[in-house]
Image (cartoon, rainbow, N blue to C red):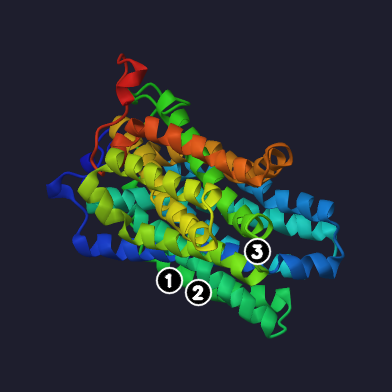
Amino acid sequence: MTGDALAPGAGPPASGDAVAPAAVRRARQGITVVFFVVGLQISAWFTQIPQIKSGLRLSDGALGLALLCPAAGALLTMQVSGRLARRRGSAPVVRLSGAVMAATLPLIGLARSPGALAAALFIVGLADGLLDVSMNAHAIAVESAAGRPILQSMHASFSLGTILGAAAGWAAIAAGASPLTFLSIVAVASLASSLTGTARLLPARADQAPAAESPGGGQRAKPGWSLFVVVLGLLGAGCLFAGGAAENWTAVFLRSLRHLTPATATAGYLGFTVATLAGRLAGDRLHRRLGPVTLVRAASVVAGLGLAAALFLPGEAVAISGFAVYGLGLSVLVPVIYGAVGHGSAGQFGAAEVAVSVTRFTTISYTGFLAGPAVIGWLAQSLGLALALGSALLVLVATFALAGFTRTALPGGSGPAREGEPAHAAL
């Protein structure tokens, strides 16, 4: 690949300078493994929370404080990850943070006090923040080199990892394995998989700032907190809020308002999860066929209809099916928005600035993930759980209305509104 193909503002390589198809395939396989491993690790840890809570005799309040620690660590290193990837390329950051996250996972099982648990979770969160930004930035680089949408399959791999992680955690608990034993096994498998996968990534120069850049040397403008990134960040926050609401409250809704048995109530969450995976497996084909704006609008409508049916129509089967349809619609939204941020930034500022924009986007959108469960609980106190969950419908209306901001989600698409254009040009 020539230097010109990687210069700021160049966007995807020209056809004559394109990455070899075999290298793109290898890189896609490698980053897909990374997404899978991250989903596996996060889900595996979640399954151990009840055992750890019991073993350390934590109160609900103490556990809640401990669970804030990985988020705090992640938010901290997210601010560093973009600049580090810009300087060194996203691939080295993925390799380092992926190995560190896997290696530190057993620290959670080693904790013998609330303080030690909080410290362990904070350390794992530090690695997760570096990895979250850099792996999405690298996935965008691979998609750009491929010249076609592939981000949906990356997020499908993450979803598959969470499903298998949950299944493995259940099996470990049934077998009587301690959290330390189970998390150590997961760590070894994750480290081996991560090292194998990251060996296939694109070279660092694929999205690294050119060494020739120097102060006063005619550099292009750098991405800031532009309207484009802020709006997409808010859309991402809304989508994560909507998804988190279903993940945390579906079973509670079915149990308390539809009066299902505990086992049957879990079918709603299972349906939501499986539908999310299915939607992402088909998402890249839909993206190519419909384009990002139409896909986002259609998915918002599908999700809204599914949620409305689950919340407001009678019948157990209708409720369970409605949550599945809700998951199907939501599944494609976040990957499209990630692509819009990445390719829009590459088109306007150059490939090296993608990670910086992804950092800012992730920082905003992460708030939806963190606040979602608590906000739903707070709203449920005064409005009831059905109306509280129904607040996600407002998110879907806003997503439909602002879908035009995702027009840059296809590889090689133009950047957001150019300097001097009105802000609404991004619509």
Observer-side mark, 2 or 3, equals: 3
Name the residue beneath numbered marker 2: 192
Tell me whether circle 1 and circle 2 mark residues in contact (CB < 8 Å).
Answer: yes
Secondary structure found at label 2: helix
Q: Position of residue 30 (x, y in %)?
A: 38, 65
Amino acid carrying mark 3 in the image: Phe
Amino acid carrying mark 1 in the image: Thr
* Residue in view at x 49 percent, y 67 percent: 161
Which one is nearer the viewer's eye here, 51 or 187?
A: 51
* Residue in view at x 65 percent, y 43 percent: 376
Q: Quadrant of residue 379?
A: top right
Tell me whether circle 2 and circle 3 mark residues in contact (CB < 8 Å).
Answer: no
Answer with left or right where residue 290 lies relative to residue 112: left
Amino acid carrying mark 2 in the image: Ala
Q: How many marks?
A: 3
Answer with left or right where residue 250 lies relative to residue 413: right
Secondary structure found at label 3: helix
On screen, 402 above or below 6? above
Answer with left or right where residue 327 lies relative to residue 52: left
| Residue 46 badge | 3
On screen, 398 above or below 68? above
Secondary structure found at label 1: helix
Neighbourhood count class around disc 3 (C-alpha, 10 Å): few under 14, some 14–19, many 20 upward? few
Name the residue beneath numbered marker 1: 196
Marks 1 and 2, how far apart at CA: 6 Å
**Can you see residue 415?**
yes
Tell me whether circle 3 and circle 1 mark residues in contact (CB < 8 Å).
Answer: no
